[in-house]
Image (cartoon, rainbow, N blue to C red):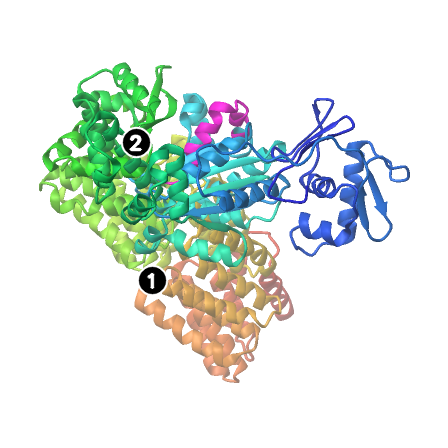
Amino acid sequence: MDDPSVPLSLRFGPFAFDEANARLLAEGQAIALAPKAFGVLTELLRHAGTLVTKDALLDSVWGHRHVSESVLKTTISELRAALGDDAKHPRWVETASRRGYRFIGSIEGTATALNEPRGLIGREPELARLRAAWSRAAAGQRQLCCVAGEAGIGKTAMIDAFVASLGEAATAHGQCIEQVGEGEPYLPVLDALAGLARTDASLVTQLRRVAPTWLLQLPWLIDREEQERLQAGLASATQDRMLREFSELVEQLTAVRPLLLVTEDLHWCDEATVRLIDHVARRRPPARLMWIVTYRTPELVANDHPLNGLRHELRARRLCEELLLDPFSEAELAAYLARHRPGLAADEAHVRRLHRQTDGLPLFVANAVDELSTATTSGDAGSHDDWAVPDSLAGVIERQRARLAPDAAALLEAAAVCGVEFACSIVAHMLGSDAATVAADCDELARRQAWLAPAALEPLADGTLEARFTFRHALYRQALYQRIAPSARVSLHRRAAAALEQWRADRIDAVAAALALHHERGLDALAAMRAYAAAGERALGRFAPHETLLLVTRGLTLLDRAPEGEARCEAELALQQLRGAALAQSTGVTTPEGRAAYLRCATLCELLPPTRPRAWVMTGLVWMFTASGEYLQAEAIALRLCAAADAFDDDLLRAAGAVSLAVTLLQRGRIGEAMPLVQRARALTEALGHPRLPVTVMHDPSALAWGVGAVVHAYTGAVELARQWAEAGAARAAEIGVPVMRGFAARCASIVDVRFGRAQQVLARTQRMRELVREHQLGQGEGPSRAMLGWARARTGDAAGLSDVEAGCAAHAATGAWFEASGLRWMAVDAALASNDLAAARRHLDDGFAMAERLGETLHLPDLWAARATLAEREGDLTAAREAAGTSARLAAEQGALTAELIARLALCELQGASPAELDDLRALRARWHDTTPWPVLARVDALLAAGA
């Protein structure tokens, strides 16, 4: 029983032990046993009667990881408790003091091989490795097995044989499909979950509890009301959340029993699935999961597929095992012939000739032998010496197709247009037949194991079941598809598109990618562009901006093929809006690509008649210009947005226009004009009940109003109101969940804290903000969050804080974003002064003034002049310090920035030789300050005025 590749199946006392299915039964009842305890029992049973050292157990069960012997001791205690064993008077597990443990019970049975695969030739070593991996998975060590080989090498046949050998083990199968796989996020994994849900009724409950984002992607499993509830509650979800939820789902599912997940043809898979595989493989918690994936290595390399680099990295870290399948050797080919054509196996010359012409490729061999068998049976060939092996597999398939009845050939060609997997109702519509007849014909082909195999029964909206079939190999479908005449192929794709639009109208978004491809290959570029836009919107709803970009880019490549006119402009606008939104959620709106997308949207809107939905495009333009520091352009677009809102009498657009305009005015120091606009936006959105916005609109007017209003209150000296508005903005952003808005609200709240010198609060807030940036991959949030964090560190005595501020400023500029650039430079100056690095303070001060002038960003000029006054004082130039402080006070007064003016006038009065007039100005200003919130600057003002009185 020492062969680890052969799972154990035996009895001892009242217990039945089944290693393959990771089960321990006591008189027919399942015993709960943790994966590590199960693994220890496996090793003890495998070496029953002999001592198994502690090192050997730790090595085999914990997989060479450094763990202490106390962990093993605890696991042994758990095992004994499950077996009802006594350490002092053991019946099953005996302790060898300081050395290890021994299983001493009487065993009935031995190690038994899994059900032997039937009809499989030459894959014994690979099957042994898969069995060993399954044993490790059953013991709690997650396994990723990559089966690689060229088309027709027998990957699917080997995996099917392995799955069959597992008996009743839980399995889930997903297939990547070239026809519909263009950027469709998680397609093979969703396919596997849907199949698992058909056999495990509890899966929906588990999805609802731990993986709601995945349940939302399987809408046919829940009713419409629950779908809407999930959509409303998951607005804040992201792709990272989907990864975490899937891992949690797997770990909970496999706590009950091991799970085999099979995903085939990953050379066609989307990037989201690759990231999911990477995430699951790197997870450290135990999971009784074995994930088998297949791919064609040459296609990974040729297409520079992201999986190619990942497989090398995971292998280097020993997180996956790759099985490379080779073609049949001559001996294996002879064994195949001995089983299927015994008369040919004895002829070594024929075996060599067949091997030479087929290169031992199993699919080619099987088809060639079938062809020979058919020809010999029908009398079309003489002896096997006269039969010529076709020069290609396509030749073999063509001969087989030639023997089909015309109706069957037409059915297979229509199915080939649909893809490797297809629905009978769609094919029936393409052929002008009925679904029942097509299903019966497909059943017959599958029964004869010719061409097709049954795939699944898919529930439809009316409660009926749709039969789905798959080609037995992708090469069958490819050969059939390629032989269709170009004009006939175009016609079939058009029929397929029409069928999808008619028969999948209730779930058109779910088939949008397939529909787009059919329209594209049916030479209807305009319809394809619209379908790619629908598929992109679906991908964006799945929190997958990268896949959205793939889809919309594919759609935009068809632009030149579409006829000119309004319809083409509309289709391009939909694609460009999605492109801009996807870039905003990843690299940012100020990258060259992001700017190009939004500027193209603006051009298209000029060419099209104005409509309410098109008016929302202007919100993206406002924020693109604002983030770029182009405040005059942003103001012009904001004014146009306000005019459009009045033209359409749309209060939500009015709110968006008002708050957009407020932001541009605020950055240019026009504080008094900004506040009424903010208050108007707040009132409008509250009256409307905060409605949801289109998926391409990321900036919520309500959250913006609260956040911008908080900053305005901070500048005007309303400390408590600033805090309240900042909290309300963060709460609203969390409610709607859009990551960009959550980041903006956190930034506004941090600006309020910076304004009043609350370094500890900024430290805590920006650490959370940076977690948000990393979690949601917000490229343009990296710089500001790091700069603010550095400022807080510098103000709390950490000398390294200045370098963080500098790095944050550089990162901000690298994205092409200049919003608040002079404010970030002021933070660098303040951090340098806190660190007493006067040279750095001077350098950053010059940069800050230059940026404020270049951008017209005058809001922070009072702060920069106040910082210059502090620097001049430290350098001993009191005249320059007094002049700078006076300039700061004058500019702040012009802006209505009471907070900045108070800081500047305090600086003037704290300088040597302050005049009575300056003290009177400070006293008058203090009288205008009505907020009672404690602030160190106020305490200094009061102390100075009291001393001067």
Give how far across and how far down residue 805 sits, in percent: 49, 67
Residue 826 vertical position relative to residue 234 in the rendered view, above or below: below
Residue 465 or residue 380, whichever sits in front: 380
Residue 505 or residue 228, whichever sits in front: 505
The mark closer to the camera, 1 or 2, is: 2
Residue 648 vertical position relative to residue 899 in the rendered view, above or below: above
Residue lying at the far bottom of the rendered structure: 876
Residue located beneath label 1 in the image: 816
Give how far across and how far down residue 544 sits, in percent: 38, 44
Q: Is residue 387 left or right of residue 937?
A: left
**Span of residues in magenta:** 185-207
Do we see residue 534 in this rendering?
no
Q: Amino acid at mark 1?
A: Gly
Q: Earlier in the sequence, mark 1 or mark 2?
A: 2
In the rendered structure, find residue 511 and report the number of the disc placed on it: 2
Q: Is residue 190 magenta?
A: yes
Q: Locate residue 289: give its quadrant.
A: top right
Give how far across and how far down residue 583 sits, in percent: 33, 51
What residue is drawn where x is 51% and y is 46%?
125
Q: Is residue 690 magenta?
A: no
Q: Is residue 372 left or right of residue 893?
A: left
Residue 490 or residue 510, whichever sits in front: 490
Q: Amino acid at mark 2?
A: Val
Q: Locate residue 948: give its quadrant.
A: bottom right
